Amino acid sequence: MIGLFKIFIIFFRIGSFTFGGGYAMLPIIKRELVDNLGWVKEEDIYNYYAIGQSTPGIIAVNTATMTGYSLNGIKGSLAATTGFIMPSLIIITFIASFFKRFQQIQLFQHAFAGIQIAVVALILDIVIKMWQKSDKSEISFIIFTTAFILLAVFSVSPVFVILSAAAAGFIMQILRQDINDNSKGDFQ
């Protein structure tokens, strides 16, 4: 079990530098918790992220909560969630009090434009890494292509696409299990 204060501090740091939401958070949380600290396995982070996307709420907060839970139960989830959202609350409160003034300053406009570009790079990086770790069977490619077309071309609700992909993956696993069970029976 990892100490609650350590969990809070790590997620406070992650929350302090996560611009762009959940997609931008994943490479940072992976680097900190998997590569640097060795607290969590890489596959677990991807699983927490996938579940975080599928559950109601903010992806980044859901992922932090699930990761904290894996580290120290309910108290760990509270420490991770609190640590993760605290920097945002502080920054938003500060910006809200001066927003009109910040909005007119060229330097801040350029800074936000730069942050947007960096977020796109972070998202692209994690998409490539997730693709490298994903199942590359024909049926997985069909699910991916169908989901992409439904989202990009037909603007179908992401909720429907995620639930449909989850159902397809579940059915695919059941069919694979049945095939494996039947092939084992042939040799006995």
Image: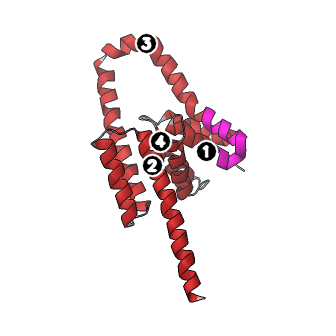
Tags 4 and 2 in contact by the CB under 8 Å rule? no
Density class for disc 3 (Cα within 10 Å; few <14, some 14-19, many ≥20) is: few
The amino acid at mark 2 is Ser
Tags 1 and 3 in contact by the CB under 8 Å rule? no
Q: Earlier in the sequence, mark 1 or mark 3?
A: 1
Say which mark, if any, is on residue 98: 3
Density class for disc 2 (Cα within 10 Å; few <14, some 14-19, many ≥20) is: some
- Residue 80 showing in the rendered view: yes
Could you tell me residue 107's position as x and y percent?
A: 30, 22
- In space, the residues marked 3 and 4 are separated at their CA atoms by 26 Å
User: In this rendering, which labeled residue sits more in front, label 4 or label 2?
Assistant: 2
Say which mark, if any, is on residue 133: none
Q: Earlier in the sequence, mark 3 or mark 4?
A: 4
Helix or strand or loop: what does disc 3 sit on?
Answer: helix
The amino acid at mark 3 is Phe
Figure check: 132 above or below 125 = below
The residue beneath circle 4 is 25
Helix or strand or loop: what does disc 4 sit on?
Answer: helix
Instruction: Say if the magenta span includes residue 70.
Output: yes
Q: Main secondary structure of the magenta part?
A: helix
Q: Which residue is rendered at x = 51% and y = 52% of the image?
A: 46
Helix or strand or loop: what does disc 1 sit on?
Answer: helix
The residue beneath circle 2 is 164
The residue beneath circle 1 is 66
Q: Earlier in the sequence, mark 3 or mark 2?
A: 3
Q: Which residues are magenta?
A: 66-82
Q: Which residue is most to the bottom?
A: 188
Could you tell me residue 132's position as x and y percent?
A: 39, 61
Q: Which residue is rendered at x = 39% and y = 66% of the image?
A: 137
Q: Earlier in the sequence, mark 4 or mark 1?
A: 4
- Residue 36 showing in the rendered view: no
